[in-house]
Image: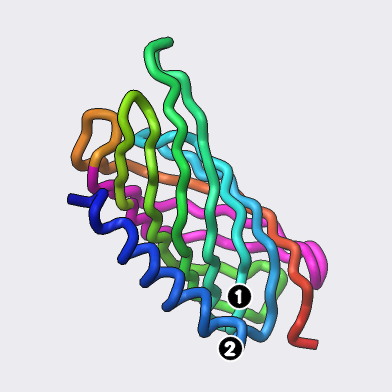
Amino acid sequence: MIRKAIYPVFALILFVFTIPLPALAMDMGVQSTVRLSPISIEESLIGVRFDQSPFVFTPKAGFGIEDRDNRDTLKVFTFGCGIDYYLSEQNALKPYVGGDILIDYVDANDSDTSLSLIPHIGAEYFLNKNFSLGADVGLHMGFGDYYDSEFRFGTASSIHGTYYFNTAE
């Protein structure tokens, strides 16, 4: 069921979060993220960050590889978007709340597709006007086929670095 819905969902995410944002974006950047979760594979993601303060949108994609019990090598390709809301913008440290909506394409002996929803809280620290480091923690809910599981629930965390182009200036 999820496998058939992947294309319309991906097209909707692409349209809603990517196409209209460049006209609204006050600042843009490139973000590199490592996502950690006990119910999923550790993944590396890269995204384009659109900062329309206090909202930040980050369309992202990435991959992860894991060798499960020396039986299957799982390759996961992920596409989706993150949405964050800054709680404060006064200091170099900016706390936020948000979430990620991700589609995971798992390639093992057969191909599986799942949808991940990850609400999170975190903070971003600006080392200077162009570079920041951040981290967040949240809940990971996965729906769909993923290594003999239809539903997954657990914690999730990620760390990320962002380079901003300061297009707002």
Could you say which disc has been placed on residue 24 in the image? 2
Specify start and end residues of the magenta stretch as a single range: 116-144
| Rendering quarter of residue 149 | top left
The answer to whether residue 145 of the structure is visible from this angle is yes
Could you say which disc has been placed on residue 131 in the image? none
Q: Residues within 10 Å of mark 1 (few under 14, many from 20)?
A: many
Seen from the viewer's position, the closer of residues 73 and 132 is 73
Q: Which is the main secondary structure of the residues drawn in magenta? A: strand
Q: Are marks 2 and 1 in contact (CB under 8 Å)?
A: yes
Seen from the viewer's position, the closer of residues 127 and 115 is 115
Q: How is the image coloured?
A: rainbow
**Image point (35%, 35%), residue name:** 39
User: Secondary structure beneath disc 2?
Assistant: helix
Expressed as whole percent of the image width and height from the top left, the position of residue 82 reads 47, 64
Relative side of 82 to 139, left or right = right
**Image point (48%, 25%), residue name:** 66
User: Secondary structure beneath disc 1?
Assistant: strand
Instruction: Name the N-terminal-most of marks 2 and 1.
Output: 2
Could you say which disc has been placed on residue 50 in the image? 1
